[in-house]
Amino acid sequence: YEQLHYRPGRPPRKTVERDIGRQIEDEEYDAYLTRRGEIAREQLGRIIELPFFESLGREKQVARIKQVFTGATRRARREIFGQGESAQERRERFAAAGD
């Protein structure tokens, strides 16, 4: 994804705290970021190797990579903080269902 000049940002700590409903310790935030990176690298490694990925245009490749990071962020949040679906995830799911 670096060849595409896409660099995912770190989820803001305040956003994470708002989503889980409490303040988090530095160690928790570090573990969360580490796990998010592990999940994303694992998934991206598989996706980038698929022939269809190369056939996508740059914009679609970047969009797919963003989807991977969004999923990795949610999964890491659930794993590290024991949280189920966040309010934002529920809103997104209901909005998608209405389409």
Image (spheres, grey):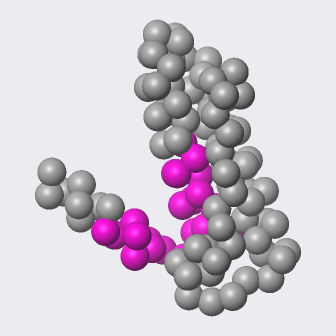
Q: Residue at x 69, y 57 (%)?
A: 10
Residue 90 shown left or right of residue 22 in the figure: left
Residue 83 shown left or right of residue 44 in the figure: left
Majority secondary structure of magenta residues: helix
Residue 70 shown left or right of residue 92 in the figure: right
Magenta stretch holds residue 63 = no
Residue nearest the observer in this picture, 99 or 80: 99
Where residue 85 sits, quadrant-wise, is bottom left
Q: Residue at x 31, y 68 (%)?
A: 91
The single residue placed furthest to the bottom in the displayed view is 22
Magenta stretch holds residue 76 = yes
Q: Is residue 26 above or below residue 70?
A: below
Q: Is residue 85 above or below residue 70?
A: below
The single residue placed furthest to the right in the displayed view is 27
Q: Is residue 10 visible?
A: yes
Q: Residue at x 23, y 60 (%)?
A: 95
The location of residue 51, given as percent across then percent down, is 52, 11
The location of residue 29, given as percent across then percent down, is 76, 71
Q: Is residue 6 above or below residue 4?
A: below
Residue 8 shown left or right of residue 74 in the figure: right
Q: Is residue 82 visible?
A: no
Residue nearest the observer in this picture, 72 or 92: 92
The single residue placed furthest to the left in the displayed view is 98
The location of residue 37, given as percent across then percent down, is 72, 49
Q: Residue at x 73, y 83 (%)?
A: 24
For the magenta stretch, what is the residue range?
68-91
Quadrant for the N terminus in the image = top right
The location of residue 80, given as percent across then percent down, is 68, 71
